[in-house]
Structure formats: structure tokens, C-alpha cells
Amino acid sequence: MTGIPADTTEEALDRVMERAAEAAPVLAAMRPAERAALLRAAADALDSAAEELVPIAIEESSLPEPRCRGELGRTTFQLRFFADLVEQGGYLEASIDRADGKWGMGPRPDVRRMLVPIGPVAVFGASNFPFAFSTAGGDTASALAAGCPVVVKAHPGHPRLARATGEAVAAALAGGGAPEGAFAVVYGEETGRRAVLHPRTRAVGFTGSIPGGRALFDLASSRPDPIPFYGELGSVNPVFVTRAAMAARGPEILEGYAGSFTQGAGQFCTKPGVLLVPREADLGPLVADIEGRAAARLLNDRVAGGFAAGLDRLSARPGVQVLVRGADGGADGWTPSLLAADADALLADPEGLLEECFGPASLVVRYDDEARLPEIAGTLHGQLTSTVHGEESDEVAPALLAVLSEHAGRVLWNGWPTGVSVTHAMHHGGPYPASTSVLHTSVGSTAIRRFLRPVAYQSVPDPLLPEALRDANPLGIPRLVDGAPEK
Amino acid sequence: MTGIPADTTEEALDRVMERAAEAAPVLAAMRPAERAALLRAAADALDSAAEELVPIAIEESSLPEPRCRGELGRTTFQLRFFADLVEQGGYLEASIDRADGKWGMGPRPDVRRMLVPIGPVAVFGASNFPFAFSTAGGDTASALAAGCPVVVKAHPGHPRLARATGEAVAAALAGGGAPEGAFAVVYGEETGRRAVLHPRTRAVGFTGSIPGGRALFDLASSRPDPIPFYGELGSVNPVFVTRAAMAARGPEILEGYAGSFTQGAGQFCTKPGVLLVPREADLGPLVADIEGRAAARLLNDRVAGGFAAGLDRLSARPGVQVLVRGADGGADGWTPSLLAADADALLADPEGLLEECFGPASLVVRYDDEARLPEIAGTLHGQLTSTVHGEESDEVAPALLAVLSEHAGRVLWNGWPTGVSVTHAMHHGGPYPASTSVLHTSVGSTAIRRFLRPVAYQSVPDPLLPEALRDANPLGIPRLVDGAPEK
């Protein structure tokens, strides 16, 4: 079991999905504290396996050790974060409307609503986060927290890590009393397509490229019974720097930009791909900074090939100048690239200049008229993030923030989009192509909603209701009664 | 302007959609009290126009006057219900995570999340609810409440009512200060398809048939930028009667069933299409009851033709007996039909026997072994509702309710699924084909969520934040702070 796992056969996938379907009602019926314990057991198991897992991650992803260790910490934090959420119970959205003979549209019966698990979830891990957005990452954590069995389709960039992570998680879940079938890892591109189409699959979580995600979204939508496909795809994450901000803090902003877009060799879905600056900005120190940065290996040959092609494409667009041409140092990886263009070139060719280029490259766009920034922002497709570096007194700020919030899932002020925190209020999503499901997030508490569906119980006697909806509130969870918080 | 409205041209639809897109940020920026006032103005306008609207509704839909008046009341109630919801502000899901240097996965910035309007919404009204699920119905009310412009594609069954209702609503909105483009009605089947594909459309609400809804869902999913399609499609709404319940209350249950499936000539998406009873149940009184019921006109020739074909199809399935064959009385309409089969026939041919037959017909299925009811329930596709008539002491009840909650959006006990109340906890949806969007409802408070998307603001200064997220909480709305209700 030390080689690369073979592709899962169609028959084996069938068995995995049938077992997941059998596990679904068992997982759903577990009490919150039991399910929280499962998540914590998985986190503990991963912490304990760190010395086994981290070297595999480094070897398969070329990411440096501190990053891998940090990402594993993010992963176990996330599992425990969702464990807490499950115990608090607010995510169930329990809501009780008592019978009311005087209800405005006519007498109403007793109606009680809560969220229940959607069923088996297929999870497609990301190339660039071998831990935090992969086998035991956010999709898996939130789906298990919701009470859904998870079938992970391993990313081909780190199959051995997927297997090792999966074994640690599976053992922890089994030890905690989870039903067989609650969790499995499968392998192979065709297996992934079959999983999306499998009748037992009830939802899909995906992090990856626009073409790959769109192809699977189309499959999910083509089913006899379409299912939700939560795909986090691509984004250029534009950053707008106002004239006043550049005057006040130019060097600091450009240094922050260089750090953000080269971090992790630019292989983040939140990498700032475009920086808009006033024409007078002195880019000299930025160019020197980028020229001085070391090479970094990309995740794998496929990513490296895609980056080289994307960089060539972007460099060749009309009006694009190459300020720093990064070099492909073979085993050492790529040094970063910096490109530049005028705002008019961007407005003339937004599709070309705003195509995501996954890797260590970014485009600086010089503008003359700050008042046109909202217009430029209006040309953007859906984005995971959009950022303004400004001063509170900037006249353009309110209009610019308003336009950015129309197309981005997260709007930042005087910060950098890389480094997405896992919190209650975090939103990591956005209009297409940032996400295939504009209402949902793949990071933060509300990621759990993707794997829950509402059920209303009408006039069901108290002993036959789910515990969350019984009069005595035995789970002690927050609920609405007649539309207001229960006392 | 008294004839049937002509189909909207492609150019006219373009203008409507562009105006809707222009109205979107204006509507979104209105304060909650202003938007609530718009909804109430629309409700008042419809109440005032009742003597104009109700006769058109009767003429176009063949529905009796009390039903039309009642439905108009439901419609205006719904508009005011959403006005209250908007003012209360909880629907915004405002959530504030303050910066925290000691956050478990590393220091976190200030992150604040809320829901914002998704943009212009295309609404497809239903044939069977000319008021409550049409021009000013639940989709329109919840989309406007969310702050989204609405473009209604009029149902061909009641185009003049759509125009008259639309004029009343448009005038009320304009009088209340809504931007031009906040609301429009368009006509024609091809216009509907164009609206789903139009680049300005951000979401679709639909109530109607499985084939019609699926065709539009496929269009929405095929767009270069797929958008959410909220389709409420078909359902057979099975009702399971336990042996003990039949023994205790048989005549009452069968009378309730007859009333429920013949109500509104069986033209409800929640009509009980299948009733499962123990073999020994005496169906004699039920047959007599159905034989004695008067004819009722169906909504239009298309519905009548579809019903006749569906009834023939269902009657011809192996194992189906016709207990009462309803008659087509021409202008008088149809008398109701009652069919019967054994549970084995249902298990052998679930697709055939569980196909929705929209109109005054239902199928009684006799079972021998009550313990097999959960297995029978397991063969069901997604349902809007599933119902149990039972006794609390029934051994089969917990398992049966658990299986039903896996495939139905609403689970009822000792009641009838027709007559969906508009409340906070109501859920009207379910797994496909009950709905194309299993996470969402078209009735009740949470219907508003379909037309809202999250945005997180990171480190944005207080004066530049939306009011809902400012420290001082100027809107006075319920919020989460660090994951717990704000004090």
C-alpha cells in the first residue's frame, strides 16, 4: 500500500455509494454530541498522524513544510469548529409555529421546520490545499457535521496523501461509532464523473478549475434528478488602490501586493490577479522586489504547464507590457512575473486581461481618472474577493464598494484577499464563475447549509417529532417560536 | 387594452431587463421601512382592485368566486407578511466577527456578513393559482421583499388577469417611490425562454409542470453563467393510513380524503394522489361519496386535455381498477374519479402508478402488511408532502415518518396536504421532482432566501459599511456577534 492507488472500479464505487446510502439515516439519527465527537476524533487522529502525513504532502505537492504543517492545523481547527457548531445547534434553524386559529390568512396548523441532512455527498478536493480543501477539508468537515456520509474523490495531485488521510479519518470515525459507509475515498477521473451521476449521490462539493468544475456541474444538472453542485471555481480577485491611498502608503501597499500574489507561488484561488493603481504610482520598487524573489515549485506538472500557457496568453494581449518575466527554473520552479497595462486596454479587452492565471503572476493596471473605477469594476465577472485600498475620505469609495459587492463574495478594505479565515461570518463564494452556487460558501460556519435541506412537520405529536422540535427542547438549542427567538 | 396581450418582442424584453438591471441597485439601497411600504402599497392596491380583478380571474380560470376572493386575500396577506419580515430584519442574517488576535487558526480580521439582493428575478406564474402563485404571488412578494426587481412572465391561462394585476402593482410601486424597472409583466412562451437566458436575469422562480419546469431549468443551467432556478414542479403527495387509524376513524379519514383530492377540482400541487389503506377498509361509503360529487370545470382546455390523458394512462396500468370513472361533462367540467390497486401492483410499477395526474382523480392502494409501509415509502420520488394518518401508539409510525422525511418537504400527521399556510416555519418544496432546488421553499418566510446572496465585508470602516453591519446597529435588527446573538 505504498504506491499510487489504482482507479476505483465502477463496481467498487457502486458498493461505496450503496454503503453511504445505508449509513445516511444512521448518521442523521445520531445526536449532536455524538456527531461532534466524531469530528473531534477525526481531528485528533490527523494531529496524531502529522509526522506521517506532512512528508507525503510535501513530496506530492512541493509545498514547503511550514505551509503543510500550518494547513494541517487549519484542517483540524476546522473539524473542531464544526463540532462546536453542531453542539450549539443553531445551524438546524429549528422554527416552531404553533397552531393559531386567528392567523391572518385563515387558521393555521402547528408547523415545525428544521434542517435535515441531504444524504451522501461527493467531495472533490483541490490541488492547492492538500489538507484544508481536500480529503478531510472544509467540504468533508461541513458535510459530516451536517450528518451526511462523504465520498471523497481524491485529487490526482496527491493520491497517496488522500489515502493516508482517508485511512486516519475512517479509523477515527469507526472508533467513534460511525456507521460503515460514513466516509470513503475513491480514485480516478472517470470515477469522479460516475460519482456525480450516481443515483445515491445527493450533493457535490468541488474546489478547482473553471473548465473542470463546469464539466461536473453540467453532469450534475443533467441527471434525471438534478442535485446541488457546490463548485468553487476561478477568480482574479481585483484590488483597487485609490490615489490618496497610494500617496499615503504606496510602498507599503506595493510590498503587501507582492507578498500576497507570490505567496504559495500564487497558487491560491484568492490570489490578487489584478492591481489597479493611479498612473503616477512609482512601480520601480515593486519591480525590484519581484525581480529579487526566489523561485518556487508549482504543485505539479499540470499546474506548471497551465501557468506557462496562461502567462504566455496574458503577455500577448494587446496593451500588456511585461515588467518582470519570471523564469522556469525546472526543478527549482518559477520566479514570479509582473505585467502591466493601461485601464483603457483593460476596458477594451476585459475577457483577455481578466482571465485567471493560476500561479506566480499578476497584472498592474494604471488608471488616470479615479472616478472611473466603479465603471471598471462594473466589467468584472463574479469574484471570490474584491479589495479596495483607500482612505475613508475618498469620494469614490462608497460607489466603488457598492459595485464590488454586486459581483464579489467578499469585499476587503486595506487588506489582502489571501489567507481566508474560518469564522462564523466568513463568506468564500460569489457569482459565477467564482462559484456555481452563488448562495453558498465553502468556508465558515454557513458552509454546513449546503448539505442540509428543510423539512416541515405539520401537526406531528410531540413524541414522534425529532428532538430538535419537541416542546421541551431537550437539545437546548436556539429556536424561533412564531417567528421570534424562543425564551 | 381589453383583448389578450400580444407576445412581448425580443427588443421589448431587452428594454424590460435593462431597466430591471438599472433598478436593482436602487431597490437594494432602499431602507427596510421603504421597501416594506412598497409591499404594503401593492397589497392595498390589489385589495382596492378586487372588484375589477376577481371577475377576470373567474372568467379566465373557471375557479369559483369564493375561491378567487380567498386567494386574493392570501395574496395580499403574503405581501404584508413579507413587509413585516423586511422590517424585522432577521432575514438579512447579519453576522459580525470582530478581529481576534487569539483566534484558534491564527489571528482573524474583522469580518461581517449579510445577505444582499441577487438582482433581477424572472417569475413564472402557475395556472392553478391566478393570484397567489402568479403575478403578485409568493415568488414576486419574496423577490421584491429581498430587494430584487421582478419580471413576471404571464401564464397563458390568465393573461388579462396578469396584465390587470401587473398594472395595479406597478402603479402602487411607482407611487411608493420604487424605481422604474422594479416590476414588469411580459408575455409569450418564447419570451419566457429568453428571460431565463437573458444576461440580466439573476434567478428564476417557477411553479408548474415537470416537463415545463425541467426545460427551463435546463436552460438556466446551460447559460454561460448558470443561475439559480427555483422550480416547484410535481408531486403525488402520498397519504398512509395505519390499520389502527382506519379502525378508529375510518369514515372520517375517507371523507377528509375525498374532500382534499376533489377540492379545487384536484388542481393543487398538494393534492393527495395516493391513499394507502389496510385491505379491510370499507371503501363503499367513499365510492358513494365520490359518485355523488358534482362536476367542476378545469382551469383550461390544456389542463383538461392533460388530465384526460393522465387518467386514461393511470387507469390502464396493470393492476389498477377503476372504482369511479368520472365523466367529462363539457362546459360543466369533470366529475371526480377514484381508482384502486394493491400494494404489490404499486411496488411492481411505482413509476406508472405514482405519476402525477393533475385534476380530480386519486388512487387508493390496499396493503396487507403494515410493517411494509416504510418499504413502500422508500420507493417514492421527491414529494412536496407526505402524510400519515395514525395513532401515536402505532409501532410503524417512527420508521414511517423517518422514511417520509427523507423524500418529502413537509410531513403531516392526521391532516391533509391541501391548503398550505403561509407561516415562518412552512416549507413548500422537496427533493426533485417536487422542486428543482431541494434547499428552498416557495412558501413561508424563508422563501425570501432564494433571492439573496451573502457578502462578507472584511475590515471595512464603519461609515463605509452597509447600515445592517455598523457597530451601532442603526436598523435595530437581530445579529450574531462572534457566533452568538448580539445583546
Image: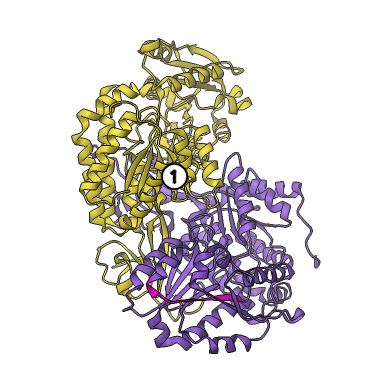
Chain colours: A yellow, B purple
Give the chain of mark 1. A
Residue B328 lies in quadrant: bottom right
Residue drawn at (35%, 63%), measured in percent from left and top? A94
Q: Quadrant of the N terminus of chain B?
A: bottom right
Count residues near mark 1 (Cα–Cα under 10 Å), then give few for <14, some for 14-19, many for 20+.
Answer: many
Pick the residue in front: A178 or B316.
Answer: B316
Instruction: Give x and y (percent) for residue B300.
Output: 72, 71
Identify the residue under disc 1: A204
Which type of secondary structure does the marked residue at label 1 adopt? Answer: strand
The residue lying at 44 percent from left, 49 percent from top is A201
Q: Nearer the viewer, residue B266 or A429?
A: B266
Residue type highlighted by circle 1: Val
Does the magenta portion include A233? no
Task: Give the residue drawn at x 21%, y 33%.
Answer: A49
- The answer to whether residue B465 shows anywhere in this view is no
Front residue (pair A473, B45): A473
Magenta span contains residue B368? yes
Name which quarter of the figure residue B395 lies in.
bottom left
What percent of the width, then of the height, locates residue B262? 59, 79
Magenta highlight: main SS = strand
In the image, the segment drawn in magenta is B361-371
Q: Is residue B226 left or right of residue B194?
A: left
Q: Where residue A133 sits: x, y (%)?
A: 36, 36
Tell me residue B174's x, y (percent): 64, 59
Identify the image quadrant of the C terminus of chain B. Answer: bottom left
Q: Residue furthest left?
A: A48
Where is B456 relative to B150, above or below? Answer: above
Q: Is residue A459 visible?
A: yes
For the point 55% across and 86% down, the residue is B286
